[in-house]
């Protein structure tokens, strides 16, 4: 049959053969995304992330709508500079609530664990890492948040200049959350989650202060954000989280975690490194924004398109 197709005059038949082969190969390679190997998960735990995502959309409609009313945001047909600034304030207020809540939950859960500050324990005795109720809540909470951010990204009323960079970030983050959950690598997963949320509230509050003309407060908050971002994502993240996958992410017999699965092991490592590359890129933007903050124009999120 293969010989017949290869030497057939029908280009459509050959195209369909190649396409079906590629699709089957891709499905086989990506099948690990659906192989639940976490012994501490049940069917309910696989449904809750969907409910969490829906909850974030409901929360966005209610809370973001309340902020739009608070800041007197007119319909989007009004493209005046004043209305755009009010809209940006509402967006930043919603994001500040979103990331602050996620950070508080993460800090509470992880500070009550006995492994968070010791990377060697992220993989010790794997896969015998039962999840406590607060840990499961945090994971479902963050899973829904990441899915919400990815789905809502194209719907943002103000499009970011680095839209595709953000899309890659959300896709990679959601992939890591999903994979670490179904394979039981939730310890390092939760460390990644907290590391990514802890700086963002300061940025959003700084932007609100800037929109309101509170330049001094905005500059102070931005400095706090910049320091927190650089320390959490460019020092702690690579030195403690990423490095742990190279030193400790192995079974006692030397096989890679999870369960000697090289595809999952190296795909997860590669995803962590992609996030680190994005951290470096955003650090450049932070420095650029800091330079702007020292100018008379004050702080502006350089990721936003010019109005």
Image: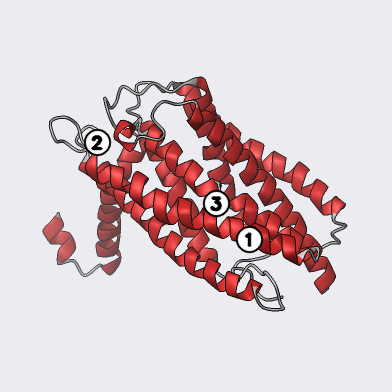
Whether the residues at callouts 3 and 1 have beta carbons within 8 Å, the answer is no
- Secondary structure beneath dot 2 equals loop
Q: Residue at x 37, y 57 (%)?
A: 274
Residue nearest the viewer, comparing 74 with 209: 209
Residue 303 - label: none
At label 2, counting other C-alpha atoms closer than 10 Å, the crowd grade (few under 14, some 14-19, many 20 or more) is: many
Which residue in the protein does label 1 denote? 222
Q: Residue at x 14, y 35 (%)?
A: 254
Residue nearest the viewer, comparing 4 with 231: 231
229 sits to left or right of 67 = left
Give the CA separation, mark 1 to mark 2: 39 Å
Residue 252: percent from the left, percent from the top? 16, 29
Which residue in the protein does label 2 denote? 257
Q: Quadrant of residue 8?
A: bottom left
Choose mark 3 or mark 1, whichever is in front.
1
262 sits to left or right of 30 = left
* 64 versus 203 height, above or below: above
Whether the residues at callouts 2 and 3 have beta carbons within 8 Å, the answer is no
**Residue 141 shows up from this direction:** yes
Q: Residue at x 48, y 42 (%)?
A: 193
Residue 134: percent from the left, percent from the top? 53, 24
At label 1, counting other C-alpha atoms closer than 10 Å, the crowd grade (few under 14, some 14-19, many 20 or more) is: many
* 118 versus 79 height, above or below: above
Q: Residue at x 73, y 64 (%)?
A: 216
Which residue in the protein does label 3 denote? 150
């Amino acid at each position: 049959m293969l010989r017949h197709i290869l030497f057939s005059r029908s280009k459509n038949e050959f195209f369909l053969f190649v396409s079906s082969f590629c699709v089957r190969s891709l499905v086989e390679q990506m099948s690990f995304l659906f192989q639940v190997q976490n012994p501490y998960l049940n069917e309910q735990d696989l449904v809750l992330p969907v409910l969490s995502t829906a909850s974030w959309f409901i929360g966005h409609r209610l809370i973001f709508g309340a902020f739009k009313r608070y800041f007197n945001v007119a319909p989007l047909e009004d493209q005046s500079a004043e209305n755009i600034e009010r809209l940006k304030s509402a967006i930043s207020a919603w994001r500040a609530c979103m990331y602050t809540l996620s950070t508080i939950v993460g800090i509470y859960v992880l500070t009550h664990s006995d492994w968070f500050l010791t990377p060697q324990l992220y993989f010790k005795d794997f896969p015998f890492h039962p999840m406590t109720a607060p840990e499961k809540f945090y994971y479902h909470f963050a899973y829904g948040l990441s899915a919400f951010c990815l789905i809502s990204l194209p719907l943002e009323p103000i499009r970011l200049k680095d839209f595709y960079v953000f899309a890659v970030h959300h896709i990679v983050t959601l992939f890591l959350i999903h994979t670490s959950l179904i394979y039981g690598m939730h310890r390092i997963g939760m460390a990644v989650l907290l590391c990514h949320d802890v700086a963002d509230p300061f940025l959003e509050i700084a932007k609100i202060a800037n929109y309101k003309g509170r330049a001094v407060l905005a500059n102070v908050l931005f400095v706090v954000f910049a320091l927190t971002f650089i320390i959490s994502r460019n020092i702690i993240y690579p030195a403690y989280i990423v490095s742990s996958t190279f030193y400790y992410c192995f079974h006692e017999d030397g096989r890679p975690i999870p369960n000697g699965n090289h595809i999952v092991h190296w795909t997860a490592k590669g995803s962590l490194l992609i996030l680190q590359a994005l951290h470096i890129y955003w650090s450049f933007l932070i420095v650029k924004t800091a330079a702007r903050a020292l100018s008379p124009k004050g702080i502006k999120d350089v990721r936003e398109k010019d109005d």
